[in-house]
């Protein structure tokens, strides 16, 4: 998000800079991939790209930097990630701005085009999603539009690569738009006086003046003190004259200008009858049908991840390949060698790097997370996730929680650490901390959800139900209690629901591969490190003390075998390590279904991973981070113990 | 509605047969004034409403009168024009306007539960209930 500022973009050896900008979820990242061959995450929900991605193309024989920017709805009133895009536009003065737009939403596209036009940068309009526009009976006279705005307008279907070549050709002929929208006389007068305050060499002075009047860009224009005073005066005078906030008037007048433009270029055929896709889209957010659909989705994911991934694949990879083919020769070779026993133990002992670290990481976790990433990718690209937010919103309302809190929670399913960052969108500090706490407490991220789901294979359906009920119950209880402390307030929670789309196998494959690579590179080393730590504890004998020290807790209170202490230690690093250790114990028949339930509840309630802890500290300070940890871990054991006492089945 | 037996077109709300019946207020049965065939009035069935909505076969709006009404009082599927967002000078109103939701915009209510969903042109938005409840519209 904002930690990636414009400083991250340096044009270096590049001759020129092209920025892809436009509303969220219009296909900028797909187009970016088509142009540069570089992958930027693509999903069917708004806000996928929250930081800039760069790639390069060769244009007229010169290397050109292309930047995929986060989606924006306006240049003059924005959230943090939208500010990234605006700052890019203002501080880097791009050679060409490519506005990517959703053709079926021409009005919204032009609302932004008018603003880009004020920036005086060469602009090209890519009218993307032409296929969907056509299917809905929207026809656009692109030539007329091009003439009216004075720029190249290229219809594209990014997912199929249609129009991309034409777009590249149009870049060479990019023009500064000649369309200028005229505001009402008082606004124009104020713009004129503010423009005079700006340095004459600046490009896009009119655009900057409008931004300054709307009260947004004061953070970037280092105006001389006298000019700041004059600006404040002009803004206050205009507000008085208009009788309402300037930003509102400007937005309203822009919409009027758009309303004049649209009928000149857009014709609408009779909208075809409701398609099955739309109908199903409607059903997914239906107050009644939404639930069975959600259930069906969960069952399918479970079948795929829990049974196929964690069953069939793990059996084969871990059982047959690793335990059957790879390890035996290594173990026998090592024992025949003259290596010191310490080293042998380190490699193939109970907590050995190969026997535990690698076989957990590669044999168990990898197939599980891979299948889960596939399932999750399909969910993301289908556009189901925002609909899920609509369905579960009710539960949050019952809690008295602000509707905006739903989005970080749903995003938490992707990665809790990233979601902790998105709690920034919440209004008050209390809300942010509450959402962070709930995230840390009971939302498992995708990788962890995969392993946790796999664990449930050793639970009976009753046990699975109990686990889900306990975790939901905790979420509701803590949320409810916290909501008493933090009164809800009016929020401007708005969620755009993209149409349901058929996921593209290519994109799913790409996403899964990039995620698995991330997992292998960033998570597995941590995992191995944790194994080494556990080995060191065990070798030095400290582990026995720890197990003894934890035994009243683990054996007494939770009723679990002593070995699980080690797994909980792993769980402090990342919940999924803890879960996978438990998975192994359960598989070897060392845990009864009841014990699986108890241990699973404890691990699910743990803080997700060390990265989350660091993110919490970064976002809210170490006191809050420490307080959340100090609450979550004992609380997890407390609930686990209660389940042990009360949840017999 | 149209009688399934004889095809006579009649207004079920204007039937006088229920006045003496103790169940009149809850009764959903109507009898055709011409042939006497009795059937269940689908407009009185919540389940029927729901099924009708699922398959997009919306029936005519129940005479919601002209003038300003709250958005959430529209029937699902009904179209209207936004009159006000509550406090039109609030930051929420500005935020909504960026999505094309501003006074004067045509709007269609999709559903109210579990969350209010509206569509504006080809844009579909889920709104916080408090925000949606403040929106006033007029029928077009
Ligand atoms: N039918 C159709 N779908 C498209 C087209 N272009 C993109 N999509 C889909 O639209 C969705 C959004 O694409 P992205 O590239 O992630 O959109 P974005 O503009 O980068 O979105 P943010 O990063 O959230 O701002 C994906 O599901 C794409 O598959 C198109 O031309 N036609
Ligand atoms: Mg993107």
Image (cartoon, coloured by chain):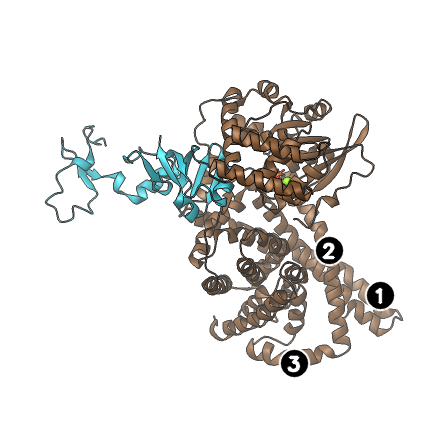
- Chain with colour cyan in the figure: B
- The disc placed on residue A549 is 3
Q: Is mark 2 within 8 Å of ligand 2?
A: no
Q: Nearer the viewer, residue B125 or A182?
A: A182
A582 and B85: which is toward the camera: B85
Q: Which residue is mark 1?
A: A333
Position in image of residue B135 (x %, y %): 40, 41
Residue under mark 2: which chain is it in?
A
**Chain shown in brown:** A
Q: How busy is the neighbourhood of tag 2: few (under 14 within 10 Å), some, or many (20 plus)?
A: few
Q: Is residue B99 above or below residue A543?
A: above
Helix or strand or loop: what does disc 3 sit on?
helix
Disc 2 and disc 3: Cα gap in Å? 32 Å
Q: Nearer the viewer, mark 2 or mark 1?
A: 2
Q: Is residue A266 above or below residue A347?
A: above
Circle on res. A522:
2
- Which numbered disc flags the more N-terminal residue, 2 or 3? 2
């Amino acid at each position: 998000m904002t930690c990636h500022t414009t400083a991250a973009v340096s044009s270096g050896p590049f001759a020129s800079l092209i920025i892809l900008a436009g509303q969220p979820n219009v296909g900028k990242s797909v187009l970016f991939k088509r142009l540069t061959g570089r992958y930027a995450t693509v999903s069917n929900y708004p806000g996928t790209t929250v930081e800039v991605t760069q790639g390069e193309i060769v244009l007229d024989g010169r290397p050109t930097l292309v930047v995929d920017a986060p989606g924006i709805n306006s240049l003059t009133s924005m959230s943090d990630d939208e500010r990234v895009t605006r700052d890019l536009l203002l501080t880097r003065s791009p050679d060409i701005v490519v506005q990517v737009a959703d053709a079926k939403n021409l009005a919204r596209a032009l609302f932004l085009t008018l603003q880009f036009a004020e920036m005086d940068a060469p602009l090209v309009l890519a009218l993307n999603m032409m296929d969907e526009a056509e299917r809905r009976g929207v026809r656009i006279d692109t030539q007329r539009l091009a003439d009216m705005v004075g720029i190249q307008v290229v219809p594209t279907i990014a997912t199929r690569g249609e129009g991309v070549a034409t777009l590249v050709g149009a870049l060479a002929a990019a023009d500064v738009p000649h369309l200028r929208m005229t505001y009402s006389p008082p606004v124009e007068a104020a713009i004129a006086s503010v423009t005079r305050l700006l340095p004459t060499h600046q490009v896009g002075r009119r655009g900057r003046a409008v931004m300054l009047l709307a009260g947004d860009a004061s953070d970037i224009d280092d105006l001389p003190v006298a000019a700041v005073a004059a600006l404040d005066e002009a803004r206050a005078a205009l507000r008085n004259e208009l009788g309402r906030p300037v930003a509102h008037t400007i937005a309203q007048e822009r919409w009027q200008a758009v309303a004049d433009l649209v009928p000149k270029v857009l014709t609408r055929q009779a909208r075809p009858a409701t398609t099955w896709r739309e109908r199903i889209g409607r059903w997914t957010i239906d107050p009644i049908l939404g639930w069975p659909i959600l259930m069906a989705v969960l069952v399918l994911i479970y079948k795929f991840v829990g049974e196929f991934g964690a069953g069939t694949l793990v059996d084969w990879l871990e059982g047959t390949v690793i335990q059957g083919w790879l390890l035996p020769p290594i173990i026998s070779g090592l024992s025949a060698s003259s290596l010191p026993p310490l080293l042998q133990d380190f490699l193939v002992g109970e907590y050995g790097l190969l026997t535990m670290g690698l076989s957990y990481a590669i044999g168990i976790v990898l197939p599980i997370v891979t299948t889960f990433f596939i399932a999750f990718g399909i969910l993301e690209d289908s556009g189901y996730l925002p609909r899920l937010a609509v369905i579960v919103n009710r539960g949050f309302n019952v809690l008295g929680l602000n509707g905006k809190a739903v989005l970080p929670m749903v995003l938490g399913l992707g990665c809790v650490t990233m979601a902790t960052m998105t709690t920034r969108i919440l209004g008050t500090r209390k809300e942010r901390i509450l959402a962070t706490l709930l995230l840390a407490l009971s939302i498992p991220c995708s990788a962890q959800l995969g392993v946790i789901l796999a664990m449930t294979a050793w639970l009976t359906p009753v046990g699975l139900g109990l686990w889900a009920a306990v975790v939901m119950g905790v979420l509701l209880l803590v949320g409810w209690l916290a909501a008493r402390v933090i009164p809800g307030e009016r929020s401007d929670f708005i969620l755009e629901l993209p149409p349901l789309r058929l996921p593209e196998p290519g994109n799913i494959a790409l996403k899964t591969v990039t995620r698995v690579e991330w997992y292998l590179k960033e998570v597995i080393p941590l995992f191995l490190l944790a194994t080494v730590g556990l080995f060191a504890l065990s070798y030095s004998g400290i582990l026995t003390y720890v197990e003894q020290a934890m035994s009243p807790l683990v054996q007494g209170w939770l009723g679990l075998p002593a070995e699980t202490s080690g797994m909980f230690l792993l769980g402090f690093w990342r919940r999924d390590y803890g879960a996978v250790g438990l998975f192994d114990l359960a598989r070897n028949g060392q845990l009864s279904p009841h014990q699986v339930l108890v241990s699973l509840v404890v691990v699910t309630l743990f803080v997700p991973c060390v990265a989350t802890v660091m993110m919490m500290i970064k976002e809210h300070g170490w006191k809050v981070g420490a307080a959340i940890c100090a609450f979550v871990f004992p609380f997890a054991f407390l609930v686990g113990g209660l389940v042990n006492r009360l949840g017999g089945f | 509605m149209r009688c399934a037996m004889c095809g006579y077109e009649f207004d079920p709300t204007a039937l006088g047969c229920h006045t003496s019946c103790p169940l009149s207020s809850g009764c959903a049965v109507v009898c055709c004034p011409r042939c006497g065939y009795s059937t269940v009035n689908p407009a009185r069935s919540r389940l029927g409403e729901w099924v009708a909505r699922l398959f997009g076969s919306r029936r005519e709006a129940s005479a919601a009168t002209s003038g300003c009404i709250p958005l959430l009082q529209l029937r699902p599927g009904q179209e209207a024009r936004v009159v006000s967002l509550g406090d039109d000078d609030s930051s929420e109103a500005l935020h909504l306007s960026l999505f094309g939701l501003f006074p004067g915009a045509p709007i269609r209510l999709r559903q109210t539960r579990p969350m209010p969903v509206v569509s504006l042109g080809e844009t579909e938005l889920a709104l916080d209930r408090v925000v949606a409840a403040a929106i006033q519209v007029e029928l077009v």
